[in-house]
Image (tube, grey):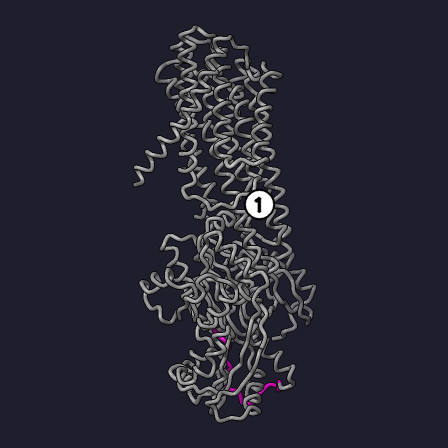
Amino acid sequence: MSLKGLTSFEVEERIRQGKINKNIDETDRPVWEIVKRNTFTFFNLIFAVIAILISLVQAWNQLIFLPIIVINTIVGIYQEIKAKRYLDQMTLLHAPQSTVIRNGQQEKIASDDLVEEDIIILKTGNQIVADARIVEGSIFVNESLLTGEADEIEKNIDDKLLSGSFVVSGEAKVILEKVGKDSYISKLTEQAKLVDHGEDSEMLRALNKLLKWVSFIILPIAVILFTQNYFVNHNTLQTSVVAMVAAVIGMIPEGLYLLTTIALTLSSVKLARNQVLLHNMKSIESLARVDVLCVDKTGTITEPRMSVEQVFVSPSSNISEAKFMSLLSDYISANTDDNDTMKAIREFMLAKGDLQNQMTGVKKIIPFSSKVKYSAVCFENESYLLGAPEIVLGKTYEKISSEINHLLEEGFRVLVLAGTKEKNYDQLNLGAYALGYVVLANPIRENAKSTFNYFAEQGVNIKVISGDNPQTVSAVAKRAGITGAERFIDANLLKTKEDLDQAVESYTVFGRVTPDQKRRLVQALKRKDHTVAMTGDGVNDILAMKSADCSIAMASGSDAATQVAQVVLLDSDFGHMTQVVTEGRRVVNNVQRSAILFLVKNLFSIILAIISAIFVFTYPLQASQLSLISLFTIGIPGFLLSLEENDKRIEKDFIKNVILKALPASLTEITAVLGVVIAGAAFKLTASEISTSAVILLAVVGFMILTKISAPLNRFKMGIIIFNIVGIIISGFMFNSLFSISKISLDSFVLVALLSLFSESLFRNFDSLLKKFFQIRKD
């Protein structure tokens, strides 16, 4: 078979036939779906019905809510489309690429542009992007993304490769046999789409539950209120419709879902501008809630580059330095691995001028595998291994450990070149003896200390999970300023689930961890009710990344890692993690605070509607009046507060916290408005005086809760409060007919003043009583 690849004409022909590797797994919604999803909502349908009813009874000023709903919908669509286009561009710039042979030349192209029968070159860390067959070379692959099995499988000429798996070691040329929608991974993805309807964000999931509860009670309450007003209280059709509409509008948290979506979307764009690409919005919130961050040593704590510090002969060996260097040179020449370690050793040997040509007489080459932690070159009578000393040398390691312990304590990585007469390729390390050592190091990242100090201050525990020697990793972690780095353990000692569960709480550094053990360590942390984030850049990190609540990859790492990760650091700067966590906490905390404002109105409207139905009195407020209150005590301040910096730890139980903090203000509003209704009946106040007095009281209590949730106050927050107080006063006077605000008598004014003073005391008492009640229940 010719390995010159397809010609340009053949590529064009296959594109015309549709045999192209376009990814059918669309990660984002098309524009038309964004428009549809924001326009045709359950609550927009309710607002449309309300608008028709109001138009029929010609209460035109009650339609004041309609422009706000339209603007909310347009803003939501605009922000999502804007973010989608920006993030699509970022994704395109950092799309996975493949090395393909076309017209006899190697070139790098986007994996989506590959076609059937293209010949591509696969190396360590590459993800297999289409179903293929090996035509030259040999590789080890991991199919865990497809099968869940962590075993590394050797693949040779004519062996089949499944898309979605990735190369652990070796190099091969492969021909693509099934691309695009015909590939294995695409078919799996299509099946997954049929059952994957999970909500991305915990906040949005909680809000959806809230909206679902509200939707169940709106219709029956609306019917009951209209029936009571029209048939029992004998109000006019217009009055009955207006009262019913006011109650329904008050129950709908129309701006809360929009505020949450926009906040998450804007954060995604903001982070993308700072070289952080999010594959979904959930990752912002997940990282904000993280209390344990698992990191690998190489590429996270240290720079991804590696350098050889020194090479020396083992004192226990009887060979000369010249002989050892010759053996090492021969080994490197024969070895086909293309990982960072081998690149560093090759560069070192080339600089010394000791690198030889390809060796003859080689019977077998075993690429490096994270499963066995060594690579090997085998001859007729002897084999040579290069890898972790304690793995390669087995039981004899203790005898020579003193030769390298001082290097491990200083944080260097030490590899041993060993010889063995063993003939069984599956157990070459049996009987291996040390010939000499290669000492390597990764420089600590410049901003590592400040980054880890930030996480320590934020109450986020760091767990270092590495495949290297635990003593070495511990020394590196100490240099990086990780708290508790002196507590380390060899993962080979952790045999059972109970061992893992105990170790994750006792140790900070885990060394000699296999890919499957990394996953099980993450799972053990989650069993302890931790929210876990996992960072990585190599194929050996993928299993753990998929098990974590949030996964972060360095763009300089393997294709497979960046595809699996929810967050990709495009410039591979771990320091950006602080920005992601800070941004996530800002969004979640601010949305939770703004949600309290929305829920005050919703709980008030629901409870007042129920009381109105039970005691058969006309709902005392109008839709236009609620729009005025919502605009200046909820909408504007809620949006402005969502922009504030806020990196406090996030409280759990989003909806529970919001409802408990909103309930005292809602009960205060209910009591105050009922006081106006009762006093109005006693003093024979007009309906317009009662409703206007209720609006004033709602504004007073609204600014009470706004002041409370804004504490501690600063100039920015004080400015928001003052701006909205002035805004509602001016609107009430200048647009009184639009918002159904009428003049009130002296009696009404005195009543409002007394109830306002009473409301402040009532609010404090309700807040105190509810805190005590729920504390008692908690205890």
- Viewer-closest of 714 and 295: 714
Query: In this orientation, does residue 364 appear?
Result: no
The residue at which mark 1 appears reads as 267
The residue that appears at 40% across and 34% down in the rendered structure is 660
Q: Which quarter of the rendered picture does the N terminus lie within?
A: bottom right
Q: Residue at x 61, y 17 (%)?
A: 735
Does 618 appear in magenta?
Answer: no
Q: Is residue 356 shown in magenta?
A: yes
**Percent x, y of residue 412:** 52, 75
Residue situated in front as seen by the camera: 400 or 214: 400
Looking at the image, can residue 360 be seen? yes
Drawn side of residue 729 relative to residue 232, left or right: right
| Residue 251 vertical placement versus 614 (above, below) | below
Q: Which residues are magenta?
A: 355-369
Q: Amino acid at mark 1?
A: Ser
Relative placement, left or right, of 172 versus 188 is right
Task: Check disc 1: other Cα within 10 Å, few if <14, some if 14-19, many if 20+.
Answer: many
Q: Position of residue 378 (x, y in %)?
A: 49, 86
User: Which residue is pictured at 39% across the width and 10% down the height?
Assistant: 231
Q: Which quarter of the figure is the C terminus placed in?
A: top left
